[in-house]
Amino acid sequence: MQSGEIKHWNQEKGYGFINVDNQNEDVFFHVSKARLPQPITVGQKVYFNSERNDKNQLRATEVTPFLLNIQESPDDTELPKSASTTTTNNHHQSKKTYNRQNRKSLRSTLFSVLALIAAAVYFFGDIPSGVLSNGVDSTEISSTYSESEQSNTTSITGDAQIDTTIQLIQQGGPFPYPNKDGTTFYNREGRLPSQSQGYYREYTVPTPGVSHRGARRIVTGGNPPTIYYLTVDHYDSFKKLDVK
């Protein structure tokens, strides 16, 4: 097969010309002869076979992608008739091994990319929103939250962080993660009773010794809240709290 690149392409009429490598004469091709990914573009590298018509014009009889022909083994070149059956079998076995390795490499690359994306979403999602938002000082939020926790005089659950979070919910803040706390909880896992969208809200319960948001949340129902649920395993299970 010859190689070249698409020099001209008329999408409406479905034909174009190939600028042939190491040859001055261009080759005409029709879309019916092209095994190319759509859309066909000028400058695309291709392989092709051609022949002359009755007017001595070069026309492509088959046009294939450049990369496809690089990856495929040269099936167009026939083995000598004297080649042994063992040589043929080895050729096909090598081709199968090569294809399997390519598939494994592609899967590995996709897995790595997805893992990086998931890690980035988790990391950046857990950065305190005060650091990212204009006009909100994260030091001020932490100080206010700490003062509120220290002034806690009412024990609801016996856990200082949970009780403080409940008090912040009841007084309307300030919250340690203002861009996260108070957002809609969609109940996608279906762990809580079905309600209309916007009925549930979620709030972060800080975990001592953890630098990010952790896995503890309080989910409230109603506006103002009339029911409180606690999850300590990031929505896998919930416990209803007795909050007056």
Image (cartoon, rainbow, N blue to C red):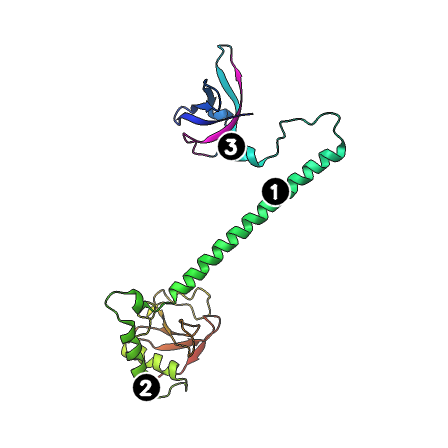
Looking at the picture, which amino acid does disc 2 mark? Gln
Location of the C terminus by quadrant is bottom left
CA gap, disc 2 and disc 1: 64 Å
Residue 208 location, x and y as percent? 42, 79
Identify the residue at horizontal 38%, vertical 64% (top origin): 125
Identify the residue at horizontal 65%, vertical 41% (top origin): 96
State the residue in front, 166 or 211: 211
Residue 98 location, x and y as percent? 62, 42
Residue at the spot of label 2: 150
Query: Dot 3 lies on which element?
Result: helix
Query: Dot 2 lies on which element?
Result: helix
Residue at the spot of label 3: 66
Residue 133 placement: quadrant: bottom left
> As drawn, which residue projects farthest toward the top?
55
Residue 38 location, x and y as percent? 45, 34
Could you tell which of marks 2 and 3 lies nearer the N-terminus?
3
Contact? badges 3 and 1 (CB < 8 Å): no
Could you tell which of marks 3 and 1 lies nearer the N-terminus?
3
Q: Is residue 177 magenta?
A: no
Range covered by the magenta-colored residues = 38-53
Residue at the spot of label 1: 99
Looking at the picture, which amino acid does disc 3 mark? Phe
Specify few, some or many for label 1: CA neighbours under 10 Å numbering under 14, 14-19, or 20 or more.
Answer: some
From this view, report whether residue 227 is shown above or below residue 185. below
Residue 54 location, x and y as percent? 51, 10
> Of discs 2 and 3, which sits in the foreground?
3
